[in-house]
Amino acid sequence: MSTLTICTTCADGQGQALLEAVENEALTRDCTLPIRGQACLAACKQSCSAALQGAGKHSYVWGQLTPDADCVDALLAVAAEHAEPGDGLLAWARRPERLKRGLIARLPPLG
């Protein structure tokens, strides 16, 4: 299972707004992906930021996110792809345009 974590303290409330927008859209889509807020992902110079993690999968951290429809849709799309069976490696060519920039880190799976 993959989890999407969104920084809630980014950019004077914009992180919280992004979290709420993603949660609301996930409800609209009947998406069961775990989404959580976290105070400070320590990517302050690249705010807003979000992380995507899963056991045995590559982890990702993105920055320069905004609480708009394009960003929300992109986050939910890559989270759904990441949740599929496999190692969670998100091919650059298959990522939504919005997430082809702003990648802060991709970490290999543990183990």
Image (cartoon, rainbow, N blue to C red):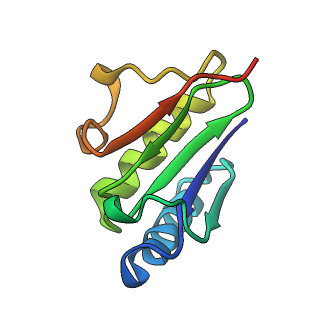
Between 52 and 78, which is closer to the camera in this rendering? 52
Q: Is residue 28 above or below residue 102?
A: below
Q: Residue 56 location in percent, x, y?
A: 72, 23
Between 31 and 97, which is closer to the camera in this rendering? 97
Q: Please state if 3 lies on the left or on the right of 24 as rendered.
A: right
Quadrant containing the N terminus in the rendered view = top right
Q: Residue 34 location in percent, x, y?
A: 69, 52
At 33% from the left and 59% from the top, the residue drawn is: 46
At 40% from the left and 65% from the top, the residue drawn is: 44
How many numbered tags mark residues here?
A: 0
Instruction: Choose top left, top right, bottom left or bottom right for residue 52.
Output: top right
Q: Please state if 47 lies on the left or on the right of 83 as rendered.
A: left
Between 81 and 107, which is closer to the camera in this rendering? 107
At 50% from the left and 76% from the top, the residue drawn is: 9
Q: Residue 86 location in percent, x, y?
A: 63, 15
Q: Residue 106 location in percent, x, y?
A: 47, 31
Q: Is residue 97 above or below residue 67?
A: above
At 49% from the left and 62% from the top, the residue drawn is: 22
Q: Please state if 73 lies on the left or on the right of 109 as rendered.
A: left
Quadrant containing the C terminus in the rendered view = top right
Q: Is residue 96 above or below residue 93?
A: below
Instruction: Choose top left, top right, bottom left or bottom right for residue 38.
Output: bottom right
